């Protein structure tokens, strides 16, 4: 099969990270890139994901919510649709 070269531009940090990742997997970067390209073409979509890590601000809010749940503070409970709608209208 004939091969051709596809050049991409990226920042040095990204290049270093993909090279290290490929080395961890024991494959060349081109294997990873070819697999991704083929999957995008086959599926006709791009899937981008990353491990999500909350910001310090969000961590603080989540901790406050946990505390509120434990103490019952700032918690509104409704018994049904009508009661929930009535509560929302009252805000």
Image: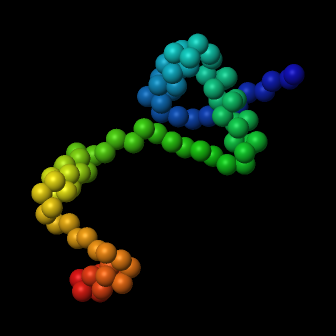
61 w.r.t. 14: above or below: below
**6 with respect to 65 (left or right):** right
Is residue 37 at all visible to an observer of this figure?
yes
What residue is drawn where x is 51% and y is 42%?
49
* Colour theme: rainbow
Q: Residue furthest front?
A: 79
Q: How many marks?
A: 0
Q: Quadrant of residue 2?
A: top right
73 displayed left or right of 56: left
Picture residue at 76% right of the left edge, 42% below the top: 42
**Point 12% across, 57% down: residue:** 71
Residue 41 coordinates in the image, percent (x, y): 74, 42
Q: Residue at x 20, y 66 (%)?
A: 75
Foreground of the two, 75 or 64: 75
Residue 12 visible in the snapshot: no
Q: Nearer the viewer, residue 53 or 1?
A: 53
Residue 87: image location, x then y, percent: 27, 82
Residue 57, placed above or below residue 84: above
Q: Is residue 3 above or below residue 69?
A: above
Which quadrant would the C terminus be assigned to in this image?
Answer: bottom left
* Percent of width and height locating residue 61: 21, 54
Question: Which residue is at the front of the view, 32 or 89?
Answer: 89
């Amino acid at each position: 099969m004939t091969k051709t070269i596809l050049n991409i531009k990226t920042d040095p940090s990204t290049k270093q990270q993909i090279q290290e990742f490929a080395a961890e997997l024991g494959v060349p970067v081109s294997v990873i890139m070819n697999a991704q390209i083929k999957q995008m073409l086959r599926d006709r979509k791009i899937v981008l994901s990353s491990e999500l890590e909350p910001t310090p601000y969000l961590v603080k809010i989540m901790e406050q919510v946990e505390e509120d749940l434990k103490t019952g503070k700032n918690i509104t409970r409704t018994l049904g649709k009508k009661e929930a709608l009535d509560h929302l209208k009252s805000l």
